[in-house]
Image (spheres, rainbow, N blue to C red):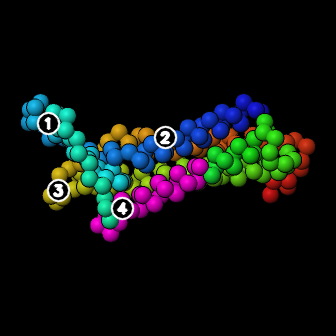
Amino acid sequence: MYRAQISALVFGVGGFGALVAATASNEWKVTTRASSVITATWVYQGLWMNCAGNALGSFHCRPHFTIFRVEGYIQACRGLMIAAVSLGFFGSIIALFGMKCTKVGGSEQAKAKIACLAGVVFILSGLCSMTGCSLYANKITTEFFDPLFVDQKMGYAYNGPTSVMSSRTKYPGGGDIKTTNPSKQFDKNAYV
Protein backbone atom coordinates (compact mmCIF):
# COMPACT_ATOMS: atom_id res chain seq x y z
CA MET A 1 0.00 0.00 0.00
CA TYR A 2 2.79 2.40 0.91
CA ARG A 3 4.70 1.70 -2.30
CA ALA A 4 1.72 2.56 -4.45
CA GLN A 5 1.16 5.81 -2.59
CA ILE A 6 4.83 6.78 -2.72
CA SER A 7 5.06 5.99 -6.44
CA ALA A 8 1.89 8.01 -7.05
CA LEU A 9 3.37 10.93 -5.14
CA VAL A 10 6.60 10.66 -7.15
CA PHE A 11 4.59 10.71 -10.39
CA GLY A 12 2.59 13.71 -9.25
CA VAL A 13 5.60 15.70 -8.04
CA GLY A 14 7.56 14.73 -11.18
CA GLY A 15 4.71 15.95 -13.34
CA PHE A 16 4.61 19.16 -11.31
CA GLY A 17 8.34 19.72 -11.92
CA ALA A 18 8.00 19.11 -15.65
CA LEU A 19 5.03 21.46 -15.73
CA VAL A 20 7.00 24.25 -14.05
CA ALA A 21 9.87 23.74 -16.49
CA ALA A 22 7.52 23.77 -19.48
CA THR A 23 5.67 26.88 -18.31
CA ALA A 24 8.87 28.85 -17.74
CA SER A 25 10.48 27.73 -21.01
CA ASN A 26 10.78 30.01 -24.04
CA GLU A 27 10.64 27.20 -26.58
CA TRP A 28 6.98 26.74 -27.41
CA LYS A 29 7.29 27.62 -31.11
CA VAL A 30 10.45 27.53 -33.20
CA THR A 31 11.52 28.39 -36.70
CA THR A 32 14.88 28.23 -38.46
CA ARG A 33 16.30 30.05 -41.40
CA ALA A 34 19.45 28.46 -42.74
CA SER A 35 20.88 29.39 -46.09
CA SER A 36 24.31 28.27 -44.90
CA VAL A 37 25.90 27.05 -41.68
CA ILE A 38 27.31 30.48 -40.88
CA THR A 39 24.09 32.44 -41.37
CA ALA A 40 21.71 30.00 -39.67
CA THR A 41 19.25 31.70 -37.30
CA TRP A 42 16.64 30.41 -34.88
CA VAL A 43 13.59 32.14 -33.51
CA TYR A 44 11.92 30.77 -30.38
CA GLN A 45 8.62 32.01 -29.06
CA GLY A 46 7.22 31.23 -25.65
CA LEU A 47 4.55 32.32 -23.24
CA TRP A 48 6.71 34.97 -21.60
CA MET A 49 9.23 36.15 -24.22
CA ASN A 50 10.54 35.73 -27.76
CA CYS A 51 14.17 34.79 -28.39
CA ALA A 52 16.41 34.75 -31.43
CA GLY A 53 19.84 33.25 -31.90
CA ASN A 54 22.32 32.53 -34.65
CA ALA A 55 25.07 30.04 -35.44
CA LEU A 56 27.77 32.40 -34.11
CA GLY A 57 26.40 32.10 -30.57
CA SER A 58 24.52 35.37 -30.28
CA PHE A 59 21.25 34.92 -28.42
CA HIS A 60 18.79 37.70 -27.56
CA CYS A 61 15.45 37.60 -25.78
CA ARG A 62 12.69 40.19 -25.61
CA PRO A 63 9.98 39.73 -22.97
CA HIS A 64 6.34 40.50 -23.54
CA PHE A 65 6.09 43.79 -21.63
CA THR A 66 2.35 44.20 -21.70
CA ILE A 67 -0.59 41.87 -21.40
CA PHE A 68 -2.77 43.71 -23.90
CA ARG A 69 -0.48 43.26 -26.92
CA VAL A 70 -0.16 39.51 -26.45
CA GLU A 71 -2.55 37.43 -28.53
CA GLY A 72 -5.58 35.90 -26.86
CA TYR A 73 -4.50 32.27 -27.17
CA ILE A 74 -1.20 33.06 -25.43
CA GLN A 75 -3.06 34.75 -22.59
CA ALA A 76 -5.42 31.79 -22.28
CA CYS A 77 -2.51 29.36 -22.35
CA ARG A 78 -0.67 31.40 -19.70
CA GLY A 79 -3.72 31.34 -17.45
CA LEU A 80 -4.24 27.61 -17.87
CA MET A 81 -0.57 26.82 -17.24
CA ILE A 82 -0.43 29.03 -14.14
CA ALA A 83 -3.61 27.37 -12.87
CA ALA A 84 -2.04 23.97 -13.52
CA VAL A 85 1.14 24.93 -11.65
CA SER A 86 -0.88 26.24 -8.70
CA LEU A 87 -3.07 23.16 -8.57
CA GLY A 88 -0.01 20.90 -8.86
CA PHE A 89 1.69 22.67 -5.96
CA PHE A 90 -1.35 22.42 -3.71
CA GLY A 91 -1.95 18.84 -4.82
CA SER A 92 1.59 17.91 -3.78
CA ILE A 93 1.14 19.48 -0.35
CA ILE A 94 -2.29 17.89 0.15
CA ALA A 95 -0.92 14.50 -0.96
CA LEU A 96 1.79 14.64 1.70
CA PHE A 97 -0.87 15.06 4.39
CA GLY A 98 -3.01 12.26 3.01
CA MET A 99 -0.36 9.54 2.81
CA LYS A 100 -0.57 6.69 5.30
CA CYS A 101 3.13 6.88 6.10
CA THR A 102 2.90 10.43 7.50
CA LYS A 103 1.86 11.29 11.05
CA VAL A 104 -0.19 14.38 10.12
CA GLY A 105 -3.72 14.28 8.76
CA GLY A 106 -5.67 12.57 11.53
CA SER A 107 -7.39 9.22 11.40
CA GLU A 108 -7.34 6.74 8.56
CA GLN A 109 -10.73 7.93 7.39
CA ALA A 110 -9.58 11.57 7.31
CA LYS A 111 -6.39 10.61 5.51
CA ALA A 112 -8.43 8.74 2.90
CA LYS A 113 -10.52 11.84 2.24
CA ILE A 114 -7.39 14.02 2.05
CA ALA A 115 -5.73 11.58 -0.37
CA CYS A 116 -8.85 11.51 -2.52
CA LEU A 117 -8.85 15.31 -2.62
CA ALA A 118 -5.16 15.30 -3.61
CA GLY A 119 -5.88 12.89 -6.46
CA VAL A 120 -8.69 15.07 -7.75
CA VAL A 121 -6.47 18.17 -7.55
CA PHE A 122 -3.69 16.39 -9.49
CA ILE A 123 -6.15 15.32 -12.18
CA LEU A 124 -7.48 18.89 -12.48
CA SER A 125 -3.91 20.16 -12.79
CA GLY A 126 -3.26 17.69 -15.59
CA LEU A 127 -6.45 18.74 -17.38
CA CYS A 128 -5.48 22.43 -17.17
CA SER A 129 -2.00 21.82 -18.55
CA MET A 130 -3.23 19.52 -21.32
CA THR A 131 -5.89 22.06 -22.33
CA GLY A 132 -3.32 24.88 -22.47
CA CYS A 133 -0.89 22.81 -24.52
CA SER A 134 -3.62 21.65 -26.88
CA LEU A 135 -4.78 25.22 -27.40
CA TYR A 136 -1.26 26.37 -28.25
CA ALA A 137 -0.59 23.36 -30.49
CA ASN A 138 -3.85 23.91 -32.34
CA LYS A 139 -2.85 27.51 -33.08
CA ILE A 140 0.58 26.43 -34.36
CA THR A 141 -0.93 23.75 -36.59
CA THR A 142 -3.63 26.06 -37.93
CA GLU A 143 -1.12 28.77 -38.82
CA PHE A 144 1.30 26.29 -40.36
CA PHE A 145 -1.21 24.71 -42.74
CA ASP A 146 -3.13 27.88 -43.56
CA PRO A 147 -2.23 28.93 -47.14
CA LEU A 148 -3.40 32.50 -46.47
CA PHE A 149 -1.14 32.98 -43.43
CA VAL A 150 1.59 35.39 -44.58
CA ASP A 151 3.83 35.62 -41.48
CA GLN A 152 6.71 33.28 -40.88
CA LYS A 153 5.65 29.64 -40.39
CA MET A 154 6.51 28.24 -36.96
CA GLY A 155 6.75 24.65 -35.82
CA TYR A 156 6.59 22.79 -32.53
CA ALA A 157 9.52 23.19 -30.17
CA TYR A 158 10.85 20.95 -27.42
CA ASN A 159 8.40 22.25 -24.86
CA GLY A 160 5.28 20.64 -26.30
CA PRO A 161 6.23 17.06 -25.38
CA THR A 162 7.45 18.22 -21.97
CA SER A 163 4.16 19.81 -21.05
CA VAL A 164 2.11 16.94 -22.42
CA MET A 165 4.22 14.46 -20.45
CA SER A 166 3.83 16.56 -17.31
CA SER A 167 0.07 16.31 -17.62
CA ARG A 168 0.25 12.60 -18.48
CA THR A 169 2.24 11.79 -15.34
CA LYS A 170 -0.37 13.51 -13.19
CA TYR A 171 -3.17 11.14 -14.23
CA PRO A 172 -1.62 7.95 -12.80
CA GLY A 173 -0.34 9.95 -9.82
CA GLY A 174 -3.74 11.42 -9.09
CA GLY A 175 -5.56 8.18 -9.73
CA ASP A 176 -3.20 6.11 -7.59
CA ILE A 177 -3.28 8.54 -4.69
CA LYS A 178 -7.05 8.75 -4.93
CA THR A 179 -7.63 4.99 -4.94
CA THR A 180 -4.90 3.46 -2.77
CA ASN A 181 -5.89 4.95 0.57
CA PRO A 182 -9.36 3.53 1.35
CA SER A 183 -9.24 1.20 4.30
CA LYS A 184 -11.26 -2.02 4.34
CA GLN A 185 -12.72 -1.39 7.79
CA PHE A 186 -15.03 1.44 6.62
CA ASP A 187 -18.23 0.97 4.71
CA LYS A 188 -18.80 2.26 1.17
CA ASN A 189 -20.25 5.59 2.36
CA ALA A 190 -17.19 6.55 4.45
CA TYR A 191 -15.61 8.58 1.61
CA VAL A 192 -18.65 10.46 0.35
State the separation of the CA atoms marked 2 and 3: 31 Å
State the separation of the CA atoms marked 1 and 3: 19 Å
Helix, strand or loop under label 3: loop
State the separation of the CA atoms marked 2 and 4: 22 Å
For discs 2 and 3, the disc positioned in front in the rendered view? 2
Helix, strand or loop under label 1: loop
Q: Which residue is mark 2?
A: 18
Q: Which residue is mark 3?
A: 151
Q: Amino acid at mark 1?
A: Ala
Residue 65 percent across, percent down from the top left:
31, 61
Q: Which residue is mark 1?
A: 40
**Circles 2 and 4 in contact, beta carbons < 8 Å:** no
For discs 1 and 4, the disc positioned in front in the rendered view? 1
Is residue 26 depicted above or below 54 in this figure? Answer: below
State the separation of the CA atoms marked 1 and 4: 29 Å
Q: Amino acid at mark 3?
A: Asp
Residue 29 percent across, percent down from the top left:
29, 47
First of labels 1, 4 by sequence position: 1
Residue 128 percent across, percent down from the top left:
51, 55
Choose between 10 and 1: the one closer to the eye: 10
**Circles 2 and 3 in contact, beta carbons < 8 Å:** no
Q: Which residue is mark 4?
A: 73
Choose between 37 and 129: the one closer to the eye: 37
Helix, strand or loop under label 2: helix
State the separation of the CA atoms marked 4 and 3: 17 Å
**Circles 2 and 1 in contact, beta carbons < 8 Å:** no
State the residue lying farthest toward the right.
185
Region in magenta: 67-89
For discs 2 and 4, the disc positioned in front in the rendered view? 2
Left or right of residue 107, residue 53 in this image: left
The 10 Å Cα crowd at callout 3, few under 14, some 14 to 19, many 20 or more, is: few
Magenta-drawn stretch contains 27:
no
